[in-house]
Amino acid sequence: MSSKVDPLRPQRPKVSVIMPSYNRADLLPAAIDSVLGQSFADFEVLVIDDGSEDATRQVVAGFSDPRIHYFHQKNSGVSAARNRGLEIARGDYLAFLDSDDLFLPAKLAFQVAQLDENHDLGLVAGGFRYIDWQGGWLAERRPWVFQPTLDLSTVLLGAAIITNSVLLRKDWIERVGGFNPNFSWAEDLDLWLRLVVAGCQMSWSQAVVCAYRMHADQAVRDVGKQSRGTLQVFGALYERSDLPEQALHLRSRAEAAARVSVAGREYGGGQFEAGRALLSEALRLDPSLAQGQNPPLLSTLIAWAAEPVTGDPAQFTRALMEHLPEEMDWEQRFAAHFMRSACIAASLDALWMKRPDLAAEYLDNALKIQPSAWQDAEKAVVVLIDALQAYEPDARPALLEQWFAALPPQLAGFRSLRKKAAGRLFMARGFKAQQRGQMAEAAAAFRQGLRRDPSWLLNRGVLSVLARDALNTNRKSR
């Protein structure tokens, strides 16, 4: 097919899926199939071949679905390829899919409904799943759990938006001018920033909508270019003279957060000296990151260690603690908590992905590398309950049981705390419901917790909620 617009293409589909591809003939069929398998059918797929030298053209020609369209251009980079797709797209809504990644089956249906129901929204972004080269599940990320709102502040400070997870209105991207071809890396971050600064309202799609494929060499591949790209994006942003006051007020924190983010890539790629330098810059911009009893930077470091790209979380944690900036004298204060938290988070991810073998491996290796991190079982249970809050409420009890089952033999004594941990889990759910004013739900959760750990009867807040719920029940029964 030529690069001219095909006159046989159906007019104005609801969604245009733009799929840039460069020498990915091996993975492109799976990406296309993931779009064809959507429960929502009113779309077109625009495959933009960015000068591939493999069988990309023949792969696309092997699909007979009339919604698929192929366009070739000389190799110009991913931003230019996506912009070519924007020129051709006929849909009211736009989605993007890299040719080595996948949409999950309900992505378009879920996100189209969001935009249809709220005309003020310009962009929605969902959660994502990490998969390995063969498509095996590794982990899932649900950004809304920790960043409930998606707005100027959260985008500036590092909201976890990946391109494949987004659906947006075409008129918004036309308003800000598409992807900036001057950025070979972090071009998506640049677009989100320009959109939110221009007033585009955004929201999370509270569902995992796509899969991001991890490459064998991803930890070290072009790490420096990714880092420089992110910093260039923020440099360009703060050269503008039309930024809103909030963006200017957040400048130091935003630039610090950007450096923390790229430091994570450097550490993940084994570039420890570069990571150390970036963290030092971040701390100069925002000293509060490393201050307090529970420094904000600590939770970020724990999240890095639990990412699939870092490999084994225990080994990564040990290496990271050895290469922190001198001003972060954390070895004695936080080493055990860091190791324990990272490995618990990673092991829960593995269990969620139906990989108990991997969860057991993470925990066993952590025990070997730093036994002192596991001497206090009570602290481990507190960390476990906190980490479980990232998962759907109804899934947490089963995950907790699976985690205790995955413990290595040396930690078998932890299992005596299983019921107490389950009680704490339900109590945490009850307290959150109480904060939302959902007293009946709070009482139900408290009763579940008490069945597992009656010692919570000594908590006055719990007794007060249960007494009030019993009184309301008696009134209704009369």
Image (cartoon, rainbow, N blue to C red):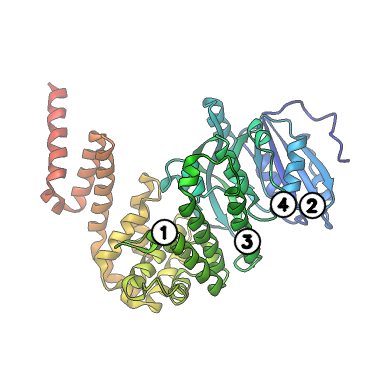
At 45% from the left and 72% from the top, the residue drawn is: 325
Looking at the rendered image, the quarter that the C terminus falls into is: top left
Position in image of residue 105 (x %, y %): 59, 41
Q: Quadrant of the N terminus?
A: top right
Relative to the observer, which residue lies in front, 473 or 266?
A: 266
Residue under pointer 4: 182
Element under disc 1: helix
The Cα–Cα distance between marks 3 and 2, rounded to whole angstroms, is 19 Å
Q: Between tags 2 and 1, which lies in front?
A: 2
Q: Is residue 263 left or right of residue 400?
A: right
User: Depth check: 278 or 90 in front?
Assistant: 278
Disc 1 or disc 3, which is closer to the eye?
A: 3
* Front: mark 1 or 4: 4
Write down the quadrant of residue 472 in the picture.
Answer: top left
Numbered circle sitting on residue 76: 2
Q: Is residue 9 above or below residue 160?
A: above
**Label 4: element kind:** loop
